[in-house]
Image: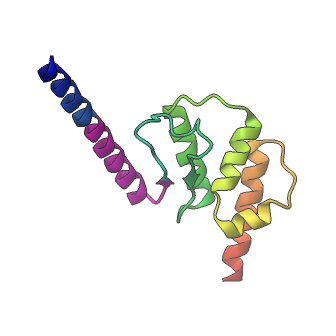
Amino acid sequence: MKTMAVCKATMLKLLMLKAVVWVVVLAVVLVKHSVVVVLSPSEPNVFLNNKKMVWQGVLTVDAYYMEMDMLMQRAHVRESLEMTLQRFLNGLRFNIKGIVRHHIYATMNELLHHAREAESQLAEEL
């Protein structure tokens, strides 16, 4: 009996280690592509937990939107438009987010338009 319990405990530890290694590899791949994703091995769906977030990093607004959209499709995320808009806004760079917050938007296209304008405005200031 003790031997089976030890085997089960060892197998569980190996499975947990394998999950952690997989998460680290996935995080490294995503960071390499300039998108920072916070992952947890106990929660495979990155987007459904409010603590999990995708950030723009050094990507353009359009590239960040495409990456976020692709990740949400792969994770089969079904959420309200308001949640998606909030998630996108929170992931924008601080200076872009500061400008976009002052605009009114009801659709993702409107939010993207304001974010693109803010990005080009900041590029002109440099």
Q: Is residue 101 above or below residue 12?
A: below
Q: Closer to the camera, 3 or 68? A: 3
124 horizontally vs 23: left or right? right
Q: How is the image coloured?
A: rainbow
Query: Residue 119: horizontal and vertical position, in percent?
Result: 69, 67
The residue shown at (81%, 59%) is: 101
The residue shown at (87%, 52%) is: 104
The residue shown at (70%, 74%) is: 122
Q: Is residue 111 above or below residue 70?
A: below
The residue shown at (32%, 43%) is: 20
Prevailing secondary structure of the magenta residues: helix
Is 33 part of what is drawn in magenta? yes
Is 21 part of what is drawn in magenta? yes
Query: Residue 115: horizontal and vertical position, in percent?
Result: 72, 59
Residue sticking out furthest to the left = 3
Residue sticking out furthest to the front = 2
* Number of marks drawn: 0
17 horizontally vs 6: left or right? right
The magenta stretch spans which residues?
Answer: 16-36
Q: Is residue 38 above or below residue 2?
A: below
Query: Residue 74: horizontal and vertical position, in percent?
Result: 48, 33
Q: Closer to the camera, 110 or 11? A: 11
- Image quadrant occupied by the N terminus: top left
Residue sticking out furthest to the bottom = 126
Query: Residue 126: horizontal and vertical position, in percent?
Result: 66, 83
Q: Closer to the camera, 2 or 76? A: 2
120 horizontally vs 102: left or right? left
Residue 95 picture quarter: bottom right
Residue 14 picture quarter: top left
